[in-house]
Image: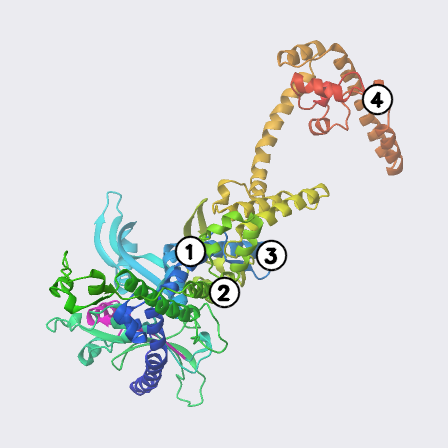
Amino acid sequence: MLKISEDKRDTIIAKLKQDIDAANAYYEETIEPAVMERYAIFHADKDYYRKMFPRLSKRCEITSTDVQDTIESTMPVLMKTFFGSTDVVTIQGADGTDEDSDRAEKMQELINYELQQNKFFMKFYRWAKDALITNLGIIKVDWDREYKEVQKTITMDAEAYAQYRPQAEAMGIKVNAAETNPAGGINVTYTAQELAKNRPRVMNLMASEFRFSLDATRLEDADFVAHRKIVSIDYLRMQGESGMYQNVEEVAQKAVAPHYTTLDTQNNEYIDEQPNRTDTGRQKVELYECYVNLNMSDDPDGRLTPMIVTVSNGVILRCEENTYERNPFFVLSPRVEPHHIWPETGFTDLIAQVQHSKTAIIRQMIYNIAQGNDSKMAIDTAALVDINDVLNNAQFIRVKGNVSEALQPLPAAQLQSWTFNMLEYLDTVKENRTGITKYNQGLDSNSLNKTATGISIITQQSNQRLELIARIFAETGLTELFRFLIKLNQLFINEELVIRLTNGPMKIDPSDLDGSFDLIVNAGMGAGAKQTNLQNLQMVRELSTQLAEVGLSGPQQWYNLAKRIIEEVGFKNVDDFLIDPSQMAAQMPQQGEQETAGEDSKTTIRSAITDAPWQVQMQFWQKLGFDVTPQMFTEQVAQKVLSSAADAQAKADASRGDVMHDRLQQANLARPRGGGRMAGTTSNAGAQAGGSTGALEPASQYNGTMAGNAAGSTTAGVSSY
């Protein structure tokens, strides 16, 4: 917290009072009436429709719920879009290097983990639903750091303990015990503060808790944005004890009952009840956490500084510089109006007129049907014995003379056929405005008689509006949220941490979070487009097969394709099905070292065997199950003689000069091989790896090799194994 003078404190309070009063007036005059009306329409509130249709409400109070039905049908599609298998917002390294990509991947995993810890599914559900109903969903993100007390014991010598004790007391570390151990050292038991929580915190806000300057066109550029809270004095005292707030008792002395808005009371009808005056801690006060640009210097023309100032009842509880470098509020709106933070028309307004019209028509229809089913009677009192028989709905009605003359039902107007046509027209208007159709919801029975391709085209066309809403959510609120979370992690994570992933733990060092990152909104994330995406991926698979034949597609590209197909199917844990080729490449050096050690031992064994007489070698390979003949070993001896001669000749050539050496080498490579192909040729891969001998194959594989080499020789040398 900054230390400021009394004069500066009074100046700040005066400026904040002007900002708060202006923001409150704008909220109560413009924002809250629109929000209250939209909530009433969403809930199909009967009191709201009593004022709209006073005469019809006396006859029938049934209301249409088109707004609620449409929004509830929209939410599953949006939630599946944002919480499916693919990340809607992807973090990428700005430089494009491998190191930058690794940092981006760790940042992506860290933010996904932090959102999971915040139960972001339900936070986003409320955020998006508020946006659809009121036209502005609001969340706030700040950093939550908590410590817990833990007991620890360390051992030190007497001299170190003498220096440690005063330092520990100066740092606020409580030494609980100091005992001498048998070795002569001192076991010191102390209480230390250990970091228990160090992550971002996401919270939903109601419209009544959010204030901003009315002249702002973009939230991030507003000079004044505030979080309005209703808190107890006891809460302020706890914050004061932790060092978060100052001047708490001054607020308690000046405390007045908070001003509750209409939305506050609608959300909690008992919120304005007076607390027990004998317990001051239960008394409520209005608190504003202001993110404001202020001139903190004495120069009237000084630059504005982003500040966070918390005030209540004209008292500053906390004043600090805004290290976030922006306000921590993020808004969603399904309809975007340029130069407006709060759009005047929203998703609810698209359907409101349809709901009003259907409510009026349905009430008239029900009243008409009620008249037909419970028709009125015309009676001739002179032809009745006692009129009370009719009034009391008696089982027997006594008449004088002809019954049809004494009692006669009044004719009722028939329900006109165009009434139903009007309802169908209103449903069509609603579908055209919102994009939510019977095809989206799987409610059109006639679609069973249509082709799958036709239904797919109709569904894709109707999904376009939903895709636009999802894209707006991703490009505005969600992208800004991710950018802010990157900033918070870079600011406040100052020690190594381990997060839990589906495929195991991941260690993250603060240095892994450095650098610049780009945020990419994944294209084609459309609601209901997975089947189309899968069909397109099958086309890509066929293309990749052709590219692989010419070397333009390899294991990594096939892995990426398979990963995307699995994600589109709906499985998020791709590692359960695939192995990343990059991970296999990292493991290959270790496996190579093990294989090299194994090959060395095998080479030693092979050398010992091949140096033995050919009769011994023949018995050895036959015991192992190989089909060998004496001719093989005869050719092997000849091959060794030729190899020795070639080596000797090569050494002689080296002494005569490089030119002659190259010519003799070429002649050596082109020398005739007995019978058309000499067994154990040095061009064989196994011979190159293991010298004159190579790895042996079982008899079945050996016979296959014999067949393959029949055109060149009658046998294959042992060294070719």
**Amino acid at circle 3:** Thr
Residue at label 1?
76
Mark 2–mark 3 distance (CA, rounded to whole Å) = 47 Å
User: Can you tell which of label 4 and label 2 is closer to the viewer?
Assistant: 2
Quick one: 332 or 193, which is closer to the camera?
332
**Amino acid at circle 2:** Asn
Mark 3–mark 1 distance (CA, rounded to whole Å) = 38 Å
Residue at label 2?
432
Mark positioned earlier in the residue sequence (1 or 4)? 1
Q: Is residue 622 magenta?
A: no
Residue at label 3?
97
Percent position (x, y) of residue 687? 72, 26
Percent position (x, y) of residue 259? 24, 78
Q: Secondary structure at mark 3?
A: loop
- Indicate the quadrant where residue 555 lies: top right
**Amino acid at circle 1:** Pro
Q: Which residues are magenta?
A: 224-246
Percent position (x, y) of residue 57? 28, 71
- Residue 579: numbered disc: none
